[in-house]
Image (tube, rainbow, N blue to C red):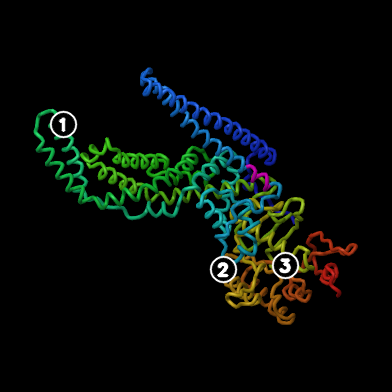
Amino acid sequence: MKLRVPSQLPQASKAPEPAPEYARRLAARRAAALELERRERWLSNTRLLVFFAAAALAWWVFIQGTVHPAMLLPPALFFVLLVVLHDRTIRARRRAERAAALYERGIARLEARWIGGGEQGERFLSGDHLYAADLDVFGRGSLFEFLCTARTRAGEDTLAAWLCAPAAPEEVRARQAAVAELAPRLDLREELALLGDEVRAGLAPEALAHWAVTPRASFHRALRTAGAVLAASALASLGAWIAGVWNAIPLLGVLILEGALGLLARKQTAAIARGVERPCRDLALLGGLLARIESERFESEKLASLRRTLDTQGVPPSRRVTRLRLFVDLLDARRNQLFAPLAALVLWTTQITRAIEAWRAQCGAAVPQWISTVGEIEALCALAGFAYEHPEHPFPEVVEGEARFESEGLGHPLLPAERCVRNDLRLGGELRVLVVSGSNMSGKSTLLRSVGTNALLAQAGAPVCAHRLRLSPLALGASIRIQDSLETGSSRFYAEITRIRRLVEQASEGPPLLFLLDEILAGTNSHDRRIGAEAVVRGFVERGAIGLITTHDLALARIADALAPRAANVHFEDQLEEGRMSFDFHLRPGVVHKSNALALMRAVGLEV
């Protein structure tokens, strides 16, 4: 079967081969880090020498009295300059080291050494999900660990959400175009990852979003007007007093009124001043990411739309964040002992906190959108990294219509290329179910996971591990890794039939279901198993679902005969060579006619 490859499928721009490009960048970042480390040591030693030289000079100035005090100014200024340069060098060295680690992880993925080295996403695991645990979406060695390069909590949350729920076809195509555009942009993805490292260290997105949208403190218009009038009056009366035009009585009267106004607004201003410091710091961290995104020109509609959502009334968020930081810096100025009297004179705290609340009224609602946009772009960058590192993986074609899953050269994306055996598989039209038989370890479960993992990648907007893939919008459900539960007192069989009931409900409600059932109803006797399995599969077919079931019980192969032509048998074979089992993992039509169970038992030393 040949699949039609539509011309509109996005193609990533030509980019350097990932392995040599990662190696080149890793060497460059390591060399930069080494050079910065040498510069850091030199600056540290120079700072120490300048300090001792300044101390000796101070002895001549203050003890001997033979040197003018102005001579201390050059070494003091030089020391301050060295402190600034030293701090910048430390930050640049750490950035280069993080960049080197980024490419080390990339090379580890290319060399299949990535397991255990990334974010595993275990917090997203849920026993209620219909396929996440069965398809190793989260956890050690999972798809999430393999894909995730996000550096913010929002990016991880977005990627996890995409892997847990299929997108609509138009959204899938929009993500595909965005991923294809981002794939060759290594500089952008590196910079976002490095900025994201800094954000991850300090950003609390939930608290920031809560602060941004919490109803703001209201300053009555009369209070605002009175504050402005009194501040202007205080400055005018002070000037008149200094100039000798008036005596101090008008100034004292204004100060009394300001004190009364300050007491009225004290509770509000104190709460605003306390509440803004952490959100402003978090926004400053986020501002670097936002500024980098703002500076990029995007061609795909998805990325361009995300970029547009950042602007508030036509103003980019980095400028909005800079304005808030200015307000907070001005608010902090009230703590300066020299400025404090003037701050009290002009009701500084009241004026600045009112400006902060006005900022929140204008921009606060946009802050959750800023965080969400950063998360989406990070998730797209994660998929783009996967696309860049696997240029042989194409984007699938997502088509409208009845349920279908048609693939050529389908493999599992987490398997190294040298171990990944690919198979062709077609479901849809008249054929709705494949009954996969075969002996233990022959590849049945891997086939189910290959189908399911590529289906969720396809509907997340990512490339797939196949030569070609064409599928319709599909809900996904699996029963592969079902376990009993001591806590709830349920057996494996009860857990399995409960999952199957939920899959039946899913097949009745949403888009067509792609079901993947491994060793279906293995927890009961052969008679009940055959009758129950046939009824379950028939129910799925009647609800418009497509899928695969696996079994090593050859009696269950009769299900395909009972449901023909809507079902068919396929199988994996094994060979016993010199007492050892071997498998080629190639899918063949028909039913397997032998089992390796006895041979495996004998191979491990059991007398059977």
Decide if residue 594 is on the left or right side of residue 566.
right
Earlier residue among tags 3 and 2: 2
Name the residue at 77% across, 76% down. 555
Pointer 1 residue = 239
Name the residue at 22% across, 39% down. 346
Pointer 3 residue = 434
Instruction: Give the image quarter of residue 579.
Output: bottom right
Q: Amino acid at mark 2?
A: Asp
Instruction: Give the image quarter of residue 317.
Output: top left
Residue depth check, mark 3 versus mark 2: number of the one nearer the observer: 2
Q: Residues within 10 Å of mark 2 (few under 14, many from 20)?
A: few
Residue 442 placement (x, y as % from top left): 78, 64
Identify the mark at residue 358; answer none if there is no mark.
none
Marks 3 and 1 sit apart, C-alpha to C-alpha, by: 91 Å
Marks 1 and 2 sit apart, C-alpha to C-alpha, by: 72 Å
Earlier residue among tags 1 and 2: 2
The answer to whether residue 82 is above or below residue 595 is above
Pointer 2 residue = 128
